[in-house]
Amino acid sequence: MQSSNFDFYDRTSLKSYNLNESMRYQLNMLDQLDVFTRKHCENVATLTCRLCEKLHLNKGFIEYCTICAYLHDLGKQFIPAEILQKPGKLTDEEYNIMKTHTTIGYKICMEDLKLRPYAIGALRHHEALNGTGYPDGLTKKDIPYEAQIIRVADEYDAIVSKRQYKSHIGISDTLKILIENANSGKNNPKIVKKLLKVVIEDIEYEISITQSYIKDLKGELKRFNQIYKYKQAMDKSKEKKDKNYYLQGIKELLIGNENLDNYLTIAKEYQDAYNTRISVIDNLYNEIKIIKKLKV
């Protein structure tokens, strides 16, 4: 199914699919979820949309699949908070309760005519191709493609959120887990391959943003360096008019709460930030190299 680029959030797309009203209704369902589950659903939907694009699926399916992803964890509103938000490993009994969010979500969707078309996402996103998933242990031929896509997006975001990455540095370890699950027959390898491309794009975007920040930092460091030169010249000057000349130059360069007593301290903070971002850039480029070598 061929597609041109589909931006789910683009106003034209929303208007074309008449989503202004229907999407508000569907997204309002997420208000019933706790903040963490809601954020997870939004993340999974965004990633699902991007995976669909990489898979060259048509716009109609991308829209449908993305809404399924938004609603995939709707059943968690009926899972006890002490289980849903437990920081440690669930007991077998707790895990069995947690698994019911799939059938609960399916029931919620089926009982609402506006949500019924998207019920499969809620029911099947934890099914695995090798039959080890739940709730019904379906195998590849019986698992809808939308559920296979959502499963990969769901698994990725769950791990990323749990590890609380401040950056994409180390993200390759998460991808290795999804690749292992693909190689063991749980995840669709083709979808996981597309995930690698999506993550690389994200890292490249992070690099571009960081480079832009580094450019700003370099400008600030250049300004502080000029202040330092003027200060050195002022201290060496013997004539009052020369001292006033350099002092005036310094005043024009100082901004905000900066002054001659604190500018060196502030300049060091900028330099530390610059050095940190340079290191981040190097690590991000290395992360891309690692990801490109991963085999699915």
Image (tube, rainbow, N blue to C red):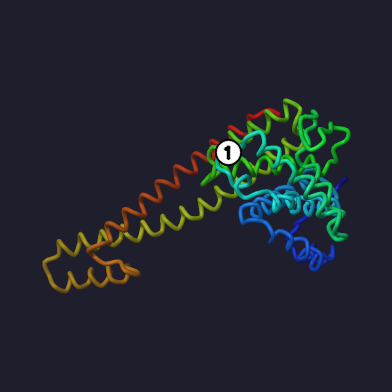
- Residue 171, compared with residue 4, is above or below; it is above
x 51%, y 51%: residue: 210
- Rendered image quadrant of residue 160: top right
Measuring from the top left, give residue 54's x and y in whole percent: 76, 44
Q: Position of residue 243 (x, y in %)?
A: 17, 69
Residue in the foreground of this view, choosing between 242 and 161? 161
Residue in the foreground of this view, choosing between 85 and 14: 85
Q: Residue at x 54, y 37 (%)?
A: 170
Give the quadrant of the N terminus: top right
Above or below residue 20? Residue 269 is above
Rendered residue at 34%/54% (across/down): 269
Residue 131 pos. (x, y %): 80, 29
- The residue identified by callout 1 is 171
Q: Does dot 1 land on a helix, a strand or a loop? A: helix
Count of marks overlaid on the render:
1
State which quadrant residue 42 falls in: bottom right
Tell me the amino acid under the disc marked 1.
Ile
Q: Which residue is at 79% across, 39% downward?
A: 148
Q: Nearer the viewer, residue 182 or 16?
A: 182
Q: Is 270 rendered above or below residue 261?
A: above
Q: Residue 206's spot in the image, x, y percent?
A: 56, 49
